[in-house]
Every structure is written in structure tokens, then in C-alpha cells.
Image: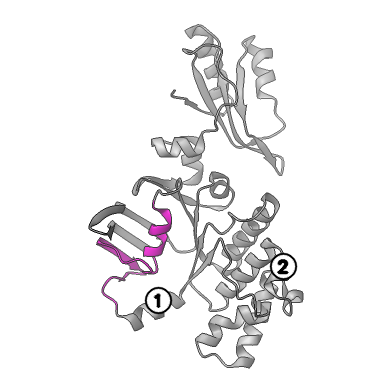
Amino acid sequence: MESVFKLENVKKIYKNEGKEFTALEDVSLEIHEGEIFGIIGMSGAGKSTLVRTLNRLEDISSGSVSFYGQELSGLKAGEIRKIRRQIAMIFQSFNLLNQRSVLDNVMQPLRIAGVKRSERKEKALEMLRVVGLEEKRSQYPTRLSGGQRQRVAIARALAGDPKVLLCDEATSALDPRMTEEILDLLKEINRSRKLTIVIITHEMSVVEKICDRVAIIDKGRLAEVGEVKEIFRTPKSAAAKKLVFPSNPFDPSDKDSRLIRIAFDGLEASRPFIAELVEKTGKKVNILSANTKSVGGIGYGQMVVELPEGAEDQDIVINFFKDNGLSLQEVER
């Protein structure tokens, strides 16, 4: 699989009034053509700085960043402009021109590129059809909902036929329903147009919904990278566990109790595992938290349970869950 971006030992240091702040430290990763790649971390982790190195909006302090094998750091201004035409970007704040119509907003990058008006209008209308907003072409951004404005921003980004779409917290300003709609749209664009998409977010639910692989950034360092399903099942780094594990709304019955996390990933949603546990083994567990959901009859999510007292009873419960295909992980406290 061809690499779109390859980062090797990337370091970024900001200098201000004689003081230095390291935003990225020794980051190495590859983003493959045609995938949806997530970059996730808590606020201030360095994820936005990382994504801005991909189109050289941020110059790195050391290391290398390449785009389809071409090293970016040595390129001149004109060469960088050509690269950036292939890397579109959308933002949390939409960045639309409120004094211009939806159609004019989508035509804007084509106007800057010198495309003839008839051609750019045809292209803009095509992109508005892609995002389902052709009937809004004469409206102004202030008359649109947040989700519609983000669709316009996506249409504008696609108008230049980029190879990559960078999404910097693109759903953070949207409500849950609008977020679902935008993520579904991005997934369809990735599928139908074979577009590589890089999503920057602090929400694990966004990554779980749409991404193929994910990089977890923690205090400027790459904590973990891999397929979303594997990291969801068995997060290894402390940063990944913090993002994946739910917070427990209830305290365990004893401070020394043993807790396990059960990951549901593609299992039948209607199967009553806890009831079956009691029926077949006679053992009970205390459910401390759960955020499971059914998607098309398939169960996804996780549950944290407190095991019964006694090592023998604990082993019976753990073996029951494992024998039924559930992924388990000890919860460290």
C-alpha cells in the first residue's frame, strides 16, 4: 500500500521570548493511500501541530515529512503551493465567506487557481450535489445550520480535486446528529472518490465511527498507532487507555476489588451475556459502567464490571466471557 505521508523522527520546537516549548518529539508514522486515518489526543497534546506539518503550514525543527515520497522541507514557495492544491483542509469554524453565496464559496479556490467561470461553476455545482446541498447554492452561510455549513466547506475542499482531505476537529462544533451525518458523508466520499482522509479529533467516538487506523498523541509524542479495532480491544499505552476506557459512574464495593473491561466489537447486540453468565455459572458481576450500542443489530462498545470475591469465582467468570468470544482487559486503578 502506497504511503501518502511519511513522517520520520519529527520534532517541532516553538520559541517565544527566549523560551522553548517542544510541541512534537520524535514522531514517526505513515499514512496510506485511500485510508481514513485518525489523529487523537487530549487538548494540547500536539495533534493540530502534527497535522499542520503535513502541508507545511508548520515547518518542523528536525526530522522529515514527505508527501508521496517528496520531502517537503526543501521545497520552495511555488512548489509548496502546488503540493497544497493536492491537500485540502476543513476546520471546526468552517471558514466560509458570509458575504458570498454558497455557490461562490465553493467556487472560491477555483477562482484563485484561475479556472474559467463557466468551468468553476459547473465544478462547484457538482460538488454541492456530492454533499447534498445543490438547492442551497443561492443561500448565504448565515442562513444555514452548522451541519450545512460544514457540508459547504467540504464541497469547497473537494472542488480542487485534492488527493487528501485534512479535517481539523471538523465535527467539534456540531451536535451529535449533525456529527453523525458529516461522518457518514466523509465515509461515503472516502469510498466513492478513493480520497485519503486524515481526521484530527479529541473524541474517541469519532475515531471508532469512521477511521481505519489511528495515532494517539500524548504530550507531543506518539503513544500508540494501529488499527482502530485493535486499539479499541486492547489499548496498550496509558494515553490510549485514558481515551478508550469509560469513566466509572459507580465506585466498586471494595477498594481492592478486581475490575475488568469487556469490549464488544461486532458481536450480536441482542445476546444477554450477563444473564447467561448467571444462568450457566451461578456467578454474578457488578456493572460499574457501560456504553454499548447496537448498529444494524451488531453490538459495539464496552462495559466495566467488578468481579466476585475469590480467585476461583473470578476465573470462572473470566473464562465464561472468553469462551463466548468477548475481549477482556484488566482495569488498572
Q: Which mark is residue 253?
A: none
Q: Could you say which quadrant of the image residue 132 lies in?
A: bottom right
- Where does residue 238 sit, x and y in percent of width and height? 40, 35
- The amino acid type, in three-letter code, at marker 1 is Ile
Q: Could you say which quadrant of the image residue 53 lies in?
A: bottom left
Which marked residue is nearer to the observer: mark 1 or mark 2? Answer: 2
Identify the residue at image location x=35%, y=45%: 219
Identify the residue at image location x=61%, y=67%: 192
Kindly give the residue lying farthest to the front in the view shown: 17
Q: Which residue is disc 1 drawn over?
A: 83
Q: Is residue 274 above or below residue 212?
A: above
- The amino acid type, in three-letter code, at marker 2 is Leu
Magenta residues, start to end: 46-75
Q: Which residue is disc 2 drawn over?
A: 144
Separation of residues labelled 1 and 2 (CA atoms): 32 Å
- Where does residue 175 sit, x and y in percent of width and height? 67, 52
User: Seen in the image, is 75 located left or right of residue 291?
Assistant: left
Q: Is residue 51 above or below residue 325?
A: below
- Where does residue 115 sit, x and y in percent of width and height? 54, 90
- The disc, 1 or 2, on the residue closer to the chain's N-terminal end is 1
Q: Quadrant of the C terminus?
A: top left
User: Seen in the image, is 294 located left or right of residue 209?
Assistant: right
Would you say residue 4 is visible in this rendering? no
Would you say residue 63 is visible in this rendering? yes
Q: Is residue 25 covered in magenta?
A: no
- Where does residue 207 sit, x and y in percent of width and height? 53, 49
Q: How is the image coloured?
A: one colour
Q: Is residue 48 covered in magenta?
A: yes
